[in-house]
């Protein structure tokens, strides 16, 4: 049995480095236009499509890129991640094939270049499942970090979003990591586990 503390530790060990590298990749783009283009096309540093957007037709992502690049003046004026997320949603949300996860991922990648991080945990299909399994209200766009159990408080909001998505099937309804023996079941394949110092 894994507690919420175990799940957080597993996330830090197995996923944090890759998530940080993705953020750095977008942060070091030479211009905002390059960052926006790559974010909209969901292209990583190897020129490959990010897995979350692998099923979206190229033409849909190209339209997303066209609209976002045309909106560069508006994007460059946002003052927070939340404002950036809302702007991205307005610009590309009406494109058939673009959903909540792509809007969030695109905003997160552009936010890396603009040096904005989420201050709350945004909900989309995967994170809603994880949050619901933990007994949190999911009839809203985001959840304040303070509503999450103590075990999650050492994570950034974008990392909590990752945990809710990655571990959604292993999280428990009403799990309370502050109580010994209460937690969540999650099978972790030891062959894929990173060694953490």
Image (spheres, rainbow, N blue to C red):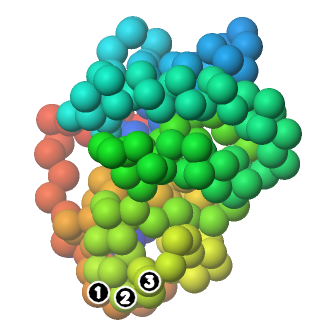
Residue 98's spot in the image, x, y percent? 37, 45
Give the mark toward the camera: 1 or 3: 3
Give the mark toward the camera: 2 or 3: 3
Residue 31 placement, left or right of 151: right
Residue 31's spot in the image, x, y percent? 73, 13
Q: Is residue 100 above or below residue 30?
A: below
Q: Is residue 60 above or below residue 38?
A: below
Relative depth, front residue between 190 and 82: 82
The residue indicated by pointer 1 is: 173
The residue indicated by pointer 3 is: 139
- For residue 183, which quarter of the picture? bottom left
Q: Quick one: label 1, few (<14), some, or many (20+) residues within 10 Å?
A: some
Q: Quick one: label 3, few (<14), some, or many (20+) residues within 10 Å?
A: few
The residue indicated by pointer 2 is: 135
CA gap between label 1 and label 2 equals: 5 Å
Q: Residue at x 38, y 75 (%)?
A: 131
CA gap between label 1 and label 3 equals: 16 Å
Disc 1 to disc 2: CB gap under 8 Å:
yes
Relative depth, front residue between 111 and 66: 66
Residue 146's spot in the image, x, y percent? 64, 79
Q: Residue at x 81, y 45 (%)?
A: 78
Marks 1 and 2, the one that precedes in the sequence: 2
Q: Residue at x 57, y 82 (%)?
A: 147
């Amino acid at each position: 049995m894994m507690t919420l503390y175990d799940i957080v530790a597993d996330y830090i060990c197995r996923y944090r480095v890759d998530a940080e590298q993705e953020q750095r990749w977008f942060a070091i783009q030479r211009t905002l236009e390059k960052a926006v283009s790559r974010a909209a096309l969901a292209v990583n540093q190897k020129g490959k499509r990010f897995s979350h957007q692998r099923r979206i037709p190229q033409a849909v992502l190209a339209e997303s890129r066209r609209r976002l690049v045309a909106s560069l003046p508006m994007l460059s004026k946002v003052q927070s991640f939340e404002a950036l997320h809302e702007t991205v949603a307005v610009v590309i949300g009406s494109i058939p094939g673009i959903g909540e996860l792509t809007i969030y991922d695109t905003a997160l990648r552009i936010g890396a270049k603009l040096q904005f991080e989420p201050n709350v945990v945004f909900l989309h299909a995967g994170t809603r499942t994880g949050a619901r399994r933990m007994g949190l209200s999911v009839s809203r766009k985001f959840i304040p970090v303070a509503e999450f159990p103590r075990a999650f408080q050492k994570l950034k909001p974008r990392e909590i979003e990752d945990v809710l998505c990655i571990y959604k099937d292993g999280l428990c309804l009403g799990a309370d990591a502050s109580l010994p023996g209460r937690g969540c079941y999650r099978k972790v394949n030891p062959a894929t586990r990173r060694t953490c110092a």
